[in-house]
Image (cartoon, helix red, strand yellow):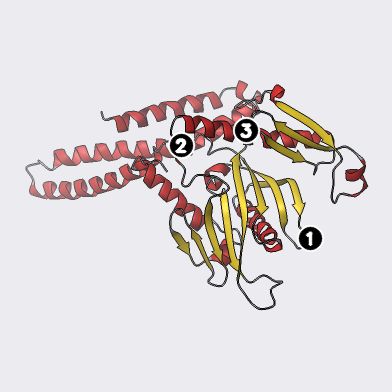
Amino acid sequence: MDAFREKLIAIEKQYDEITEELGSESIAQDIKKLTKLSREQARLKGSVDAWHQLKQLDQAIEEAEIMSKDEDQEIREMAQMELEEATAERETLLDKIQKMLIPRDPEDECDVIMEIRGGAGGDEGNIFAGDLYRMYTRYAESRGWKVAVMEASVSEAGGFSQIVFSIKGEDVYKYLKWESGVHRVQRVPKTETQGRIHTSTATVLCQPEIEEDVFELDMKDLTIETHRASGAGGQHINKTDSAVRIVHIPTGIMVNCQEGRSQIENRETALRIIRSRVYEEVQRQKEEAAGKERRAKIGTGDRSEKIRTYNYPQNRVTDHRIHFTTNHLDIIMEGKLDEVIEALQTEEERKKLEGENL
């Protein structure tokens, strides 16, 4: 038996073990474990179903080969037709299974914390940051994900100078992991009286939200300060030291939160954000030390990398990392990102199959 089928047998065994564990009475007492195992079972099911189909085709081909040697010519001809059909179907299935067996990014099933900042272009950059936030929230809604704002600085002209938000749901990071970088917009701003096209930018940072049991921060490495919040929020936000600033001393990473109604809420939010950011930095350092590109990703995943241009006059979106262009900007800005994300997924699959470092 080849290694290909041996791997499928191992997956089927793992699937059966998970199914058995999910059927036990004790699992209902551990909601976190129940959720994790249910997700893993759902992820493996496609491979298990494909394995069952492959076994049926293997058997059909074996029987057709025997029949093709029959003394009866009519039976031989019928067997040859069945053999050709089953062989072609098996080849298609094997290609599909090969993609299924591509090593999965262990962070794919994570929720995400996203940060969008207005960049070059002043007010127009902030307005575009607001447009991107709207685009991502609509995409999240279309997939049944939940969005929650963690921190926001609203721009007077509209949009945001900065907004941090979480997205929770099934396989969120799997679909949004390529969004980090500089997003460039080319359009005529509402404030432009001469009709000239301006170029502005917003930066996006998308990181997997890491649970405490996966990566635990050493509290000795943190300085936690409280201070009086600034900006909108009424009397409460201005009269209490509810804002929280946390600095991770070894990396210098700093997070400030003041959107919550209490110091406890802001502290919890700041810890969630800084845990994910420190985790990403630790992973980056490990992979650099090993001489590897980060997570075999398309592009660097760095917020300074120019990744995409949104050209409004031509209704065009271009992803520069994979040289992908579509003339559906109006649809994409409404949150219909599937066309772009599927192109990125296809390219990642191709490079992984070829063994390239992205």
Question: Relative to the observer, which residue lies in front, 211 or 351?
Answer: 351
Q: In the image, is 67 to the left or to the right of 9?
A: left
Which amino acid type is marked by label 1? Glu
Label 3's element? helix
* Residue occupied by mark 1: 156
- Whole-percent x, y for residue 95 in the image: 32, 44
Pointer 1 and pointer 3: residues touching (CB < 8 Å)? Answer: no
Q: Quadrant of residue 332?
A: bottom right
208 lies above or below 22: below
Label 2 vs label 3, nearer the camera: 3
Which amino acid type is marked by label 3? Val
Label 2 crowd (10 A; few <14 / some 14-19 / many >=20): few
* Residue occupied by mark 3: 278
Which disc number belongs to residue 104? 2
- The quarter of the picture where the N terminus appears is top left
Q: Quadrant of residue 276?
A: top right
- The quarter of the picture where the C terminus appears is top left
Q: Disc 2 versus disc 3: distance between alpha carbons?
A: 22 Å
Q: Quadrant of residue 311?
A: bottom right
Which numbered disc flags the more N-terminal residue, 1 or 3? Answer: 1
Label 1 crowd (10 A; few <14 / some 14-19 / many >=20): few
Pointer 1 and pointer 2: residues touching (CB < 8 Å)? Answer: no
- Whole-percent x, y for residue 142 in the image: 60, 54
